[in-house]
Image: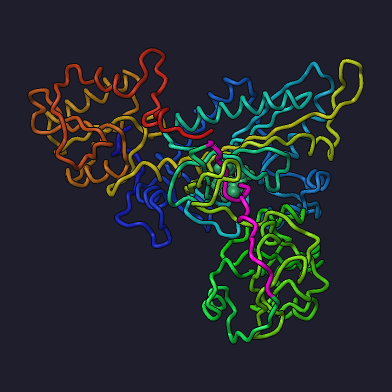
Amino acid sequence: MRLSKMHVNTLREAPAEADIPSHIWLLRSGMIRKLASGIYGFMPMGYRSVRKIEEIVRQEMDAKGAQEIHMSAIQPAELWKESGRWYVMGPEMWRLNDRRGREFCLGPTHEEIFTDIVRNEISSYRQLPMNLYQIQTKYRDEARPRFGLMRAREFVMKDAYSFDKDRAGLDRSYNEMFDAYMRVFARCGLRFRAVEADSGTMGGNASHEFQALADSGESEMVYCDACGMAATTERSNTADAPVSREEAFPAETVYTPGTKTIEDVANYLGLTADKTIKALLFAVLNEDGSTAEYAVAFIRGDRELNMTKLINYLGIPEHALVFADETDIESVTGAVGGFTGPMGLHDCKIIVDRELPGQMNMCAGANEVDRHIKNVNYGRDYTAEHITDLKLIRAGDPCPECGAPVKTARGVEVGQVYKLGVKYSESMGAYYKDENMKDQLIVMGSYGIGVTRTLAAVVEQNHDDDGVIWPVSVAPYHVIVTIVKHGDAAQTALAERIYAELEAAGLEVLLDDRDERAGVKFKDADIFGIPVRITVGKKAGEDIVEYKLRRENFSSEKSSAVAVKGAVEFIRAELLGPSDGAFRAGGGRAADIVGA
Ligand code: ATP
Ligand code: MG
């Protein structure tokens, strides 16, 4: 491709709202353009990279025997009502009506649609197992669209669904997909980790997320070097603090003026936060948005609440749990905002973290303004019907499996796999007939890869201060040939020759033949991040060009002058695999893949 013929517009500066490298560089390199909040279009180079990721995904899915299909993005509400998720998906689901008032949504995912296909198409055990997938646009009206392609409202997902006769079959399908995902992300050049995950609104009983390591990532993972435990923090169990051996002191109400936070009350009373009890006040909403009940969660004062665990414990959708209005909850339950404690609450669900009953002489709110109670003990002063693990694990905590201190890391969730079991086949009636002509439920799994989020994750891990540094596998082009002096006959002739030879050798080449200063061309080449740059300059007459790798930084001194003769073979060998022309991982070094 000749740059003089290609539409590309690099930006000197990124818009202010772009605050992480991938968002900045995708915009500055002209790969993506924003249409509305969380909604982006792909420009020529951006779309090439998207298609490269799609192709990697497609190859790895096909290699596992999955079959590509393509379902519509518009989905009738009836299917979601059958599965029960029309309500569960909440405000994130993009809903619309047709001219007759019939309800539809723009698909956020396709479990219902694939289950519907299969219940109509599959009748016998002979047709199973089966795995169907698509690469398709998904819509989610995210509460906080941000970071460009990372959390968009319209994005490309590869979603696959496996259909098996039984659980053992599902385990096999799941492992195959897990393996395919490892290969996909390695080929995309990502450093990533597979971790155990919560299955959220998808349901089912086992799940893993694939997390591209990045400090800017929205997900947090916890892992243990001693035993290999690795999970998202929201999924991870926690180890409780050891049971206290203190003797019980008498409870005592104390005056604690204006101490609405744990920090305030601990300072005021000269306590450490782990001797206090923190209260979090929630309202659980009905489908119509009215309050179904109030819930108060209690955890040790120095802990953070794990919202996912609370939601799972309550068995409600995420959007049905909201922070309670203090005045409303006060009038119903006797809780007092900032001074809420477990003693004397009524008409609400009290949920206590599992470690609290073992802690002695704690300080809790007195449900009275400016008052706390010291030496509160479980059993004597309060009890609770609901005791469960509610706390969020953090770095340094003992591993819930082996006790060694855990570490945390941040990541971008690029994929997730779920063992759905019979959740959808049961609610939607997807059966097959077994060998004895008996109806059996189809056992399902579902498997998602965020294609466009993966593109952003690749940039997040592969950039420097001058632009993107594409791994070969995802780069929009492999080589950029830059003519230093526009109009110079020798340079133009040699560049054209190299361009033709590289293309003939199966490489994807950009020829920078624009009428621009060399400095502009070099800067753009840095921003584009094409893996190899060939610069055709003064020595063109001697058939000598400069060869540079983007990952060693185009702007650096490091370069090598190479004779054109042999250069094509050299570049080919550097970029492409030995025999079949399959792309080398280009940075997806197997040694970087940890976990799983
Ligand atoms: P998240 O927790 O980040 O909201 P999710 O768990 O809801 O994601 P899944 O339902 O597991 O997402 O979807 C499969 C994949 O689709 C995710 O692993 C992610 O890569 C991608 N994805 C999900 N939401 C978005 C989004 N808003 N923008 C871009 N990609 C997304
Ligand atoms: Mg997910």
Residue drawn at 32 percent across, 49 percent down: 10
Residue drawn at 57 percent across, 20 percent down: 63
Estimate the x, y position of residue 305 in percent, counting from the top left.
Answer: 62, 60
Examine the rendering and report whether any part of residue 154 can be seen: no
Which residue sits furthest front? 247
Residue 537's image quarter? top left
Residue drawn at 54 percent across, 38 percent down: 210
Residue drawn at 78 percent across, 76 percent down: 344
In this view, 486 is above or below 498: below
Of 553 and 372, nearer the camera is 372
Q: Is 237 within the magenta?
A: yes
Q: Which quadrant is home to the N terminus? A: top left
Side of 272 relative to 491 (left or right):
right
In this view, 480 is above or below 388: above
Magenta residue span? 227-249
Estimate the x, y position of residue 193 in percent, counting from the top left.
Answer: 50, 37
